[in-house]
Amino acid sequence: MDTKHVGNFTQNIHDEDYEIPYLSKMVTASDMIIDTGREKESLNGYWNFQIDQYDTCIRSKWYEEKYKNENGMYLPVDFDFDRWGTIKVPSCWNTQKERFYYYEGPAVYTRTFRYVNKGEKRVFLKFGAANYEAKVFLNRKYIGMHRGGSTPFYFEVTGMLEENNRLLVVVDNTRKKEAVPARNTDWFNYGGIYRDVELIRLPETFIKDFYISLVPDSGFKKIRVVLEIDGPEKNGMARLEIPKLNLYKEMECVDGKADVIINAEPELWSPEKPRLYDVKVSYLSDTIQDRIGFREIKADKNGIYLNGKKIFLKGVCAHEESVINGKAVTDDEIIENFKLAKEMNCNFMRLAHYPHTERAAKIADRMGILLWEEIPVYWAIDFSNPDTYKNAENQLTELIKRDRNRASVIIWSVGNENADTDERLQFMSSLAKKAKEVDPSRLVSAACLVDHSELKIKDRLVDYLDIIGINEYYGWYAPDFNDLIKVFNNSNPQKPVVITEFGADALKGARGTVNDLGTEDCQMHIYKMQTETLGKIPYIHGTSPWILYDFRCPRRTSALQLEYNRKGLLSEDKTYKKPAFYVMKEFYASIKD
Ligand code: GCB
């Protein structure tokens, strides 16, 4: 490759310099390790940070730190890690400095850390999430990249650590046609390492994966335990302990695998009584611990059943966002969301439209909120692209592997509002099958389609799902509200329907007649009409209006929106409840399971 030589370093002048073949190794769901209840060392804190709009770090291989002059200056003299500014990890760069607010593109994070071996044989690095793509370098070497902005990824770094280490990560939040999500969404495109970075020390042989669930249809009397062991000693006995169930069980692992059914009668987890058990699993010198609830979720034509009892999902949708922290939400902010939902008499929340932090499901486990979790197969996706499918399937698998021990999570959603084509059907039905394969104990759904000319629910994907999610905006985007009842009368769904979205924009404090769009009065009126109608349809078994609080969205530019989607039941800072909040609260109070 021709390069322009300048002294003893080179300047890249060709566009192909972007395509560096060895930067293609990826980490995926198969590289994940179970880490709940393990000791982790945080690599959060202040990292050196630089916006790198032209991707010069990659093209000029800054990460190699190859040349330094006699004054200790890096050559080319275009970068100096230690003198860059710093940024907080985890955080979204958009919220850290005003001039980063709209930045979309690559940026470089780097930090040093010391490492002294404590006797461990294996070491892993975990990133909770980086939006959207992350290329990671350790001690001047590329260790892999991850695609997908909301799921965790892991690198084994055994044998690669020195006493003093440099970690460098190029994070790129550029929206791309072939990515998941693609270029156009209805939320803010945050960038950065916005979840924890951690170091995990493990023995040579360790528990790589662990999945425990009540066996469906076992009369709540059987538990399935699946284990995967990594390392040289793949045959041996693992031990499961659930002291409060008086359960101490040896499980044989053969070839690194165990899959056993155990008799047990746990007290069942429910929103009213979110009972969790301390669970411990050990294998040789490795131990993991978790707090886990046991419950059964099922659906048939007549309803959705939690622990055998019919349940109405009294829900609300939420994005992962706070005004101050963007997507890097704190535990307090998550707890506040669940408390607000509970105040509205909810038992359910739809975490739209991508995987929220794993802390959300852990908190929901404790607080007793049922969850719908989703991957960002949103609107127009490059459905005929096999690479796009691989990416979506990987994000789905990462999400399920991350959260399948959480009792609160009852539904995996494989997407939202995607136009019905053969390619989309193939793509999304394959995702639905994959979800069932990775986790047979939960329900699978998606926000499906209404045919607005025939006025009926019509979506071929329904055949592959357990629950039909429907987003409908009658009274708002579809102005003739009377059509809503026609849609329901014309439909004869053979599976339970959950209205996964309805709503209307309202600017906090804006008043007017019920016909004045954008006012609280109009929003409240639409909520009244919606709840009156939805409450009468026997095949609707849940609702999650759009949305708990206003959220940032650059496509929403009207005077009432001001770059926010204003369909919140609360203002963006959650301090103000719009009147429609109370309509929902009353509606849910009136529903008896
Ligand atoms: C939808 C989308 C959601 C949007 C919402 C809206 O159907 O699923 O992401 O934000 O409508 O406000 O238009």
Image (spheres, rainbow, N blue to C red):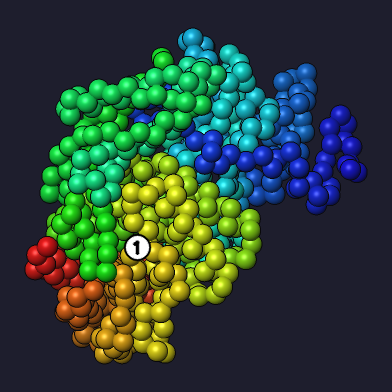
Q: How many marks?
A: 1
Q: Is residue 279 left or right of residue 274?
A: right
Amino acid type, label 1: Asp
Residue that label 1 marks: 466
The percent coordinates of residue 570 (x first, y second) are: 24, 63
Image point (72%, 20%), residue name: 72
Image quadrant where residue 250 sits: top left
Residue for point 68% across, 29% down: 141
Look at the numbered disc 1 and give the secondary structure of its residue. Answer: loop
Query: Is any part of residue 490 visible from this angle?
Result: yes
Q: Going by the picture, which residue comes out furthest to the top?
A: 119
- Expressed as whole percent of the image width and height from the top left, the position of residue 319 reads 36, 57
State the residue at coordinates (56%, 27%): 156
Query: From the viewer's perspective, is 294 left or right of 47?
Result: left
The one nearer the camera, 276 or 141, is 276
Residue placed most toward the observer, 250 or 23: 250
Query: Image quadrant for the N terminus?
Result: top right
Q: Is residue 574 above or below residue 38?
A: below
Residue at x 13%, y 70% (from the top left corner) = 587
The foreground one among 215 and 186 is 215
